[in-house]
Image (tube, rainbow, N blue to C red):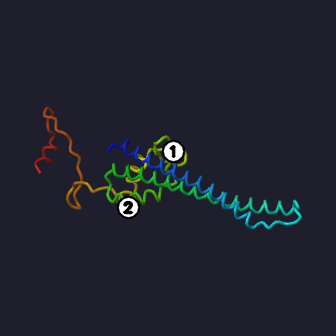
Amino acid sequence: MTEQEIQALIDASLNSFKTEISTEFTKANQGLAASVTKEIKKLQVPQPTTTESTESIQEKLTLKALEQQLTDLKTQLANKDLETISAKRSSAVSQVIANSKALSPATLQKVFLLDQADKIKEENGKWYVAQGDSVSTLDDALNSYLSSEDGKAFVPASGVQGSSAQETKVTPVDPNQKLKAVDALFESF
């Protein structure tokens, strides 16, 4: 699957989840309002004299209960939204980590998210890391983290054998160029 297909699949499942939650929220509100009115009617005792002060107090009490339930439902929806954003962020970070071929990707993801989660933002499907005034892509932020002291533990070892060996860079040899004495001596060893 390509990255776009995976992203489309994730977006489709998130949209269906969001639709399902809003449908359940609407159904819950309709049922809640009906049950609250039934309970109110059961609790109300017909009084021979109706006074405006008693009615207004009862209306205020039921209104407060409904407002409390509404705020509770809003809080639950906000928590669901935060969980959805967190899941999308985690998915984006795991994809970037998979592309980096770092060691222990699950541990790296947890450590990176622990350090950067509040700075990772999304805009138009693109993930970036905002640190103060500077903004960098998620790939650049991960590469910067991997080059830091904390991130070096997740970088795979080089192909050099032994603990005292030094990694050397291979330079291409030009057949038309004459060898220097130092290079000839180095090649002889």
Residue in the foreground of this view, choosing between 159 and 125: 125
- Considering depth in this image, is 34 or 23 the residue closer to the camera? 34
Q: Residues within 10 Å of mark 1 (few under 14, many from 20)?
A: few
Residue 141: % across, % down: 43, 49
Residue 51 placement, left or right of 29:
right
Q: Residue at x 55, y 51 (%)?
A: 23
Query: Can you identify the residue that label 2 sits on?
Result: 107
**Residue at figure coordinates x 85%, y 64% from the top left:** 54
* Residue 183 percent across, percent down from the top left: 16, 44
Q: What's the mark number on residue 134? A: 1
Judged from the image, the secondary structure of the residue bearing numbered disc 2 is helix
Q: Residue at x 46, y 42 (%)?
A: 125
The picture places residue 26, in percent across and down from the top left corner, at 59, 52
Q: Nearer the viewer, residue 181 or 67?
A: 67
Helix, strand or loop for disc 1: strand
Indicate the amino acid at tag 2. Thr
- How far apart marks 2 and 1 lie (CA) works out to 26 Å
